[in-house]
Image (cartoon, rainbow, N blue to C red):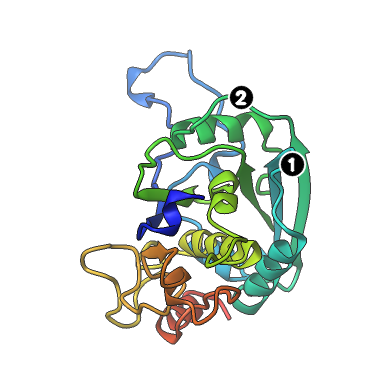
Amino acid sequence: MKLFRYLPYLLLMSFIVLSSCKSDDSSGGDDTEEPNPNAGNLLSVGDSAADLLGGTEFDAINIELVFVENFNPRAATVDNLRIFLEERLNKPGGITITERSIDPIGMQPFSTAEIAEIEDQVRTVYNQGSTLGVFIFFTDGANINDTQFSKTLGTAYRNTSLVIYEETIREFSDEAGEPGRVALESTTLNHEFAHLLGLVNLGTPLTSDHEDPINTRHCVVEDCLMFFQTEIQGGVFKMKSLDAITPLDPLCIADLQANGGL
């Protein structure tokens, strides 16, 4: 019998903003580095919010979903992500999601810096022409900052990159009194992708005052996808059903629409 059934675990969904690496041009001389052709995908979370939402510069999105072998998301989770994006993104050229597996990595738990290093090794899809590339990684390990009472389910860590800690998702789903795995996967995945879209006040400007002043970059509305916490007891984001996927509230949707989304 698992201990978390009796304790009010607080699972935090987080995002981490990483700066892109830039060469120092102040030293002079001829020994300059070649510019990184993928620099547009190595920016901070929220920097590509308008490009992800609108259809002016990028009219299509190519999502590369990579998972460690046997830690793939449910097919319904991928379908739910597609529905979520089609409802919010203005992409007349379409949204493509391709999935592939990689061998177990053998290094866990993971820091976000280690996840970024893994991405650099396995990612193949980047911005190309009018198609914007996105990387989603489902890993077999947990986050290195997890404690007995606090678990990280997912992290958006670059402007087009996010990780889902699938091992942790499975630990807290699909048993009596727990969310269904599709619901927990989908809510986590949509939440982290919404950070890439600039929510809340993270590249997509506010159209109303709904950013949580304590838990910044999150919404004050408890029934919103962008509320800051996930609770096993009491439901995911105050979900009415353990099998429901938490939606965005109208205030967050208004922000996305004002930044080029649907």
- Tell me if residue 85 comes above or below residue 10 in the rendering: below
Identify which residue is drawn at 47% across, 74% down: 259
Cα distance between the residues tagged 1 and 2: 14 Å
Identify which residue is drawn at 56% across, 65% down: 190
Q: Which residue is mark 1?
A: 70
- Spot the residue most to the left: 214
Residue 237: which numbered mark, if any?
none
Residue 106: which numbered mark, if any?
2
- Tell me if residue 253 comes above or below residue 113 in the rendering: below
Q: Is residue 28 left or right of residue 94?
A: left
Find residue 256 and report its horizontal and vertical position in percent.
48, 76
Find residue 38 and report its horizontal and vertical position in percent.
60, 39
For this rendering, which residue is in front, 29 or 224? 224
For this rendering, which residue is in front, 136 or 187? 187
Identify which residue is drawn at 42% across, 63% down: 230
Count all numbered tags in the image, as a single digit: 2
Give the residue type that dot 2 points to: Gly
Give the residue type that dot 1 points to: Asn
